Amino acid sequence: MSRRRDISAGLFHVTCHSVWELDLFRDDVDRVNYLAELVRTMRRRGWICPVVCLMTTHAHFMFEIGDDSLAEGMQELNFRYAVSFNARHRRRGRVFGAPYSPTRIRDDSHLLTAYRYVVMNPVEAGLVDRPEDWRWSSYATTIGLSQDFAFVNANRVLGALGGPPEVARARLRAFVEADLPVTIS
């Protein structure tokens, strides 16, 4: 018996992984191309994206969707990227190991835990020391250090922490970076 994915309206942590050990993003051009397809898909589908983090072999997102368009939207996003990736790198075949993996966000505690997991991925992988230093994560935009991911809307994440925006950003940063070593300048 097949198991149906829970993809009705709601908020989801979504991951996409490359096939085998293939780099999903070989360089910054690939990452920019994927982000362009992501924004196109979000606009067409009316999705809200509270966080995105592109790694080397996989990507993490959160999507808030108002209908059951997650499966179609992810198929559209990943198909368009795979076609451009294969053309650019003169290859054929699959790029993604599976279409995508969604996990429904159940409550604010789960939202914050999943958010922290997403933005700490580059730190855990040893790519950077601090999450705001990973260029391909929306975290620096959310805490007010950049405008690179202007399409990201983290209002729901910040709202889970309460207070005016500057207070919520400080609380988010303290929550995300709680276990990082303190650096003395």
Image (spheres, helix red, strand yellow):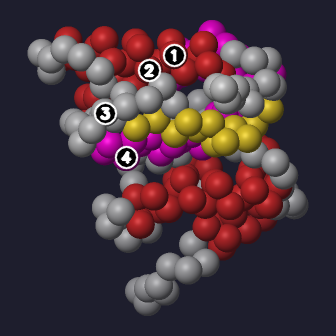
Q: Amino acid at mark 2?
A: Asn
Graded by Cα atoms within 10 Å as few (under 14), some (14 to 19) or many (20 or more), the crowding at tag 4 reads many
Per the rendering, the mark at residue 90 is: none
Q: Is residue 169 above or below residue 75?
A: below
Q: Is residue 70 above or below residue 140?
A: above
Q: Nearer the viewer, mark 4 or mark 3?
A: 3
- Tell me where residue 12 appears, x and y as whole percent: 69, 38
Q: Which residues are magenta?
A: 38-66
Q: Residue under label 3, please give it.
A: 19
Verify CB contact (< 8 Å) between mark 1 and mark 2: yes
Q: Residue furthest right?
A: 163
Separation of marks 4 and 2 at Cα, in angstroms: 15 Å
Q: Residue under label 2, please give it.
A: 78
Pick whichever of labels 4 and 3 is earlier in the sequence: 3
Q: Amino acid at mark 3?
A: Val
Q: Residue under label 4, please give it.
A: 55
Asked whether, in this view, residue 162 is left or right of residue 22, the answer is right
Residue 13 seen by the camera: yes
Disc 1, SS:
helix
Asked whether, in this view, residue 76 is left or right of residue 158, the answer is left
Q: Residue under label 1, please give it.
A: 75
